Image (cartoon, helix red, strand yellow):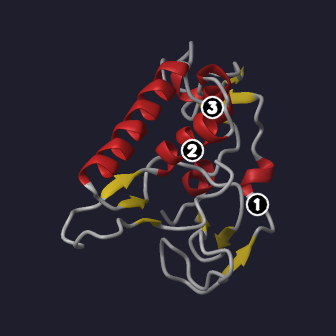
């Protein structure tokens, strides 16, 4: 996902504010954006999101049901959470080694989202730009395997130790390498 929506949600007009909001995860928002705004088919959209086509179909169906629920029942929609990875505003903490994304682009991050330290820097060694998009790696034995487009690395199993592979140099590995965590 390139960026989250530029707003936090929608409110109904003409109804009381007593209705609980419908929570639309960022990946559901992205599925709606790709299929209904960008007009990509499910296969192309699933490749863009780097998930399988059946997983994309489930996310897309969930998003459409939630939007329909909000429209029919007059509920507000709030965007938040989910399993997403944004392409901008990465920071690294010099104290704990954490990489984190700051969604408020207009306001600079001041504290680490993990340990709270103020000793952070923006994008010097941005994990987004260091990820090897063509290689999956076993986090246990280190075996490298060519990435198959459209199939997430986590869906491939290491033939040596039977463990799910991960994207090579993905941000999670920076935390794993840190001895303080």
Q: Residue furthest left?
A: 18
| Residue at the image position 39 percent from the left and 61 percent from the top | 78
Q: Which residue is mark 2?
A: 30
Closer to us: mark 1 or mark 3? 3
Q: State the image coordinates of residue 17 (x, y, percent, origin top left).
A: 24, 73
Secondary element type, mark 3: loop
> Where 119 falls versus 78 (above or below)?
below
| Residue at the image position 50 percent from the left and 51 percent from the top | 26
In the rendered image, which quarter is residue 153 located in? Answer: top right
Secondary element type, mark 1: loop
Q: Residue furthest front?
A: 14
Q: CA distance from mark 3 to mark 2?
A: 12 Å
Q: Which of disc 3 and disc 1 is earlier in sequence?
A: 3
Q: State the image coordinates of residue 134 (x, y, percent, origin top left).
A: 77, 29
Category of crowding for the residue at label 3, using alpha-carbon neighbours closer than 10 angstroms: few (below 14), some (14–19), many (at least 20): some
Residue 159 or residue 25, whichever sits in front: 25
Q: Which residue is mark 3?
A: 50
Secondary element type, mark 2: helix
In the rendered image, which quarter is residue 111 located in? Answer: bottom right
Q: CA distance from mark 1 to mark 3?
A: 20 Å
Q: Which residue is mark 1?
A: 126
């Amino acid at each position: 996902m390139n960026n989250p929506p530029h707003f936090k949600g929608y409110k109904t007009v003409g109804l009381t504010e007593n209705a609980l909001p419908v929570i639309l995860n960022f990946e559901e928002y992205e599925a709606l954006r790709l299929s209904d705004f960008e007009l990509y088919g499910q296969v192309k959209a699933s490749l863009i999101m780097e998930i399988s086509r059946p997983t994309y179909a489930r996310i897309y169906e969930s998003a459409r049901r939630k939007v329909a629920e909000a429209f029919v029942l007059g509920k507000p929609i709030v965007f938040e959470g989910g399993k997403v990875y944004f392409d901008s505003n990465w920071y690294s903490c010099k104290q704990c080694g954490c990489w984190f994304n700051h969604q408020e682009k207009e306001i600079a991050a001041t504290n680490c989202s993990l340990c709270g330290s103020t000793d952070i820097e923006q994008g010097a060694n941005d994990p987004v730009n260091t990820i090897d998009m063509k290689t999956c790696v076993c986090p246990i034995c280190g075996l490298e395997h060519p990435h198959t487009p459209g199939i997430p690395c986590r869906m491939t199993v290491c033939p040596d130790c039977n463990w799910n592979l991960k994207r090579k140099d993905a941000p999670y590995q920076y935390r794993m390498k840190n001895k303080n965590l």
